Every structure is written in C-alpha cells, then in structure tokens.
Image (cartoon, helix red, strand yellow):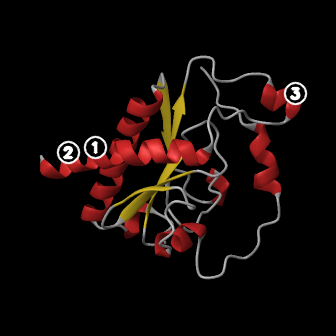
C-alpha cells in the first residue's frame, strides 16, 4: 500500500488558530466576491470548489457546501447530489489539466478524524502521480509544488467552466 505523507503540513496543523470571526474560513470565502484571491474555481447553487492553500500536492482542491454544517446529515438530497457532481467535475478538470495517475478523494468528519475545519463539511480531491513523494519533505521540511497556486487555479477554472457547462447542457 502506498502512503500519502505530507510532514510539512504539521506546522500548519499544530499552529495556534485564531478564532474565526463570522464563521469558518469556508463561510467567509463563500460570502466573498473575491474568487481570484481565494482560489475559488467554480460555484454552484449550494456548493463551491477551491484550491487548498496548504496542499498535499499541486492541484489539491476542496469542495464545500455554502451551508456551514459538520456532517452529511444536514444536506438535502439535492445539495448532496450537487456536492458529489461538483467533486466529479473537479476530478475531471484535474485529469484534463494535470494528468495525474490517480486521486485521493476524502472527507474527515470530526476533529478526531483529522478534520482541520470540523464545523464545515468539505471534500478533498488530491491528484497523485507515480513517484510523487520525494526527499524534500523529509530532509528540508518543505513540499515542492510545480506551479504557482494562481496559475493552477486559472487553468482549473477554465477547465471546470467547460465541464460544468457541458453537464448543464446535457
């Protein structure tokens, strides 16, 4: 079994967190109209997709409902369907733009399960490549991203727009 290791993230995980005013970071981004600086890739009726600022790998993105809920149970069937369709569209966009060999797709429900923002459900999609782990995180305590987040975001925004347009017109 291959393991996904990202020890450079420990600094972020252990760092003291400032109390978030006005809800979770996802709620703040959902209410913001500055999609570019927030790395928002696409918006639906009940959810949105954005790049992770602290990625495990290049292209690591998340999909979150606008509604700040901790678990699946508070989503309507329609919201759940849109969340899953947005996840699928994001995976397709990542495949098209970055050509990964595989994906980690996951949800951490609750602090003990590893949720960094437990009060706001979100799905992680992490593209993976054969041999994508190397010595940098272990030796240098740093991850290597092959491209600036803003550049990755722009490419994924364009691809997602095309994919979502096709899905809505089908």
Q: 149 above or below 33? A: above
Q: Residue at x 38, y 38 (%)?
A: 93
- SS at circle 1: helix
In which image quadrant can residue 133 be found? top right
Instruction: State the residue position of label 2.
Output: 166
Q: Which residue occupies the extreme left position in the image?
A: 170
Q: Report whether 66 appears left or right of 128.
A: left
Query: Which quadrant is home to the N terminus?
Result: top right
Observer-side mark, 3 or 2, equals 2
Nearer-N-terminus badge (3/2): 3
Q: 137 above or below 117? A: above
Q: Which residue occupies the extreme bottom position in the image?
A: 22
Dot 1 and dot 2 residues touching (CB under 8 Å): yes
In which image quadrant can residue 46 be found? bottom left
Gap in angstroms between the C-alphas marked 3 and 1:
39 Å
Q: Report whether 35 appears left or right of 9.
A: left
Image position, residue 72 (x, y; %): 41, 61
Image position, residue 66 (x, y; %): 42, 69
Between 55 and 76, the one lying in front of the other is: 55
Dot 3 and dot 2 residues touching (CB under 8 Å): no
In which image quadrant can residue 2 be found? top right
Gap in angstroms between the C-alphas marked 1 and 2:
5 Å
Observer-side mark, 3 or 1, equals 1
Instruction: State the residue position of label 3.
Output: 139
Q: Residue at x 51, y 68 (%)?
A: 34
Q: Residues within 10 Å of mark 2 (few under 14, many from 20)?
A: few
Q: Residues within 10 Å of mark 1 (few under 14, many from 20)?
A: some
Q: Residue at x 72, y 32 (%)?
A: 144
Instruction: State the residue position of label 1.
Output: 163
Image position, residue 157 (x, y; %): 41, 48
């Amino acid at each position: 079994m291959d393991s996904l290791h990202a020890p450079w993230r420990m600094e972020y995980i252990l760092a003291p967190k400032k109390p978030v005013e006005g809800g979770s970071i996802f709620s703040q981004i959902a209410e913001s109209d500055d999609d570019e600086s927030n790395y928002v890739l696409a918006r639906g009726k009940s959810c949105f997709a954005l790049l992770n600022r602290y990625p495990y790998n290049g292209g690591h993105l998340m999909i979150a409902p606008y509604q700040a809920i901790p678990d699946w149970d508070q989503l309507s069937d329609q919201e759940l369907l849109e969340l899953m369709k947005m996840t699928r569209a994001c995976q397709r966009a990542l495949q098209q733009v970055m050509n990964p060999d595989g994906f980690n797709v996951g949800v951490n429900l609750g602090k003990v399960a590893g949720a960094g923002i437990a009060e706001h459900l979100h799905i992680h999609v992490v593209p993976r490549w054969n041999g994508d782990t190397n010595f940098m995180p272990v030796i240098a305590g740093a991850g290597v991203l092959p491209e600036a987040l803003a550049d990755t975001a722009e490419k994924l925004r364009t691809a997602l727009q095309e994919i979502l347009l096709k899905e809505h017109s089908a």
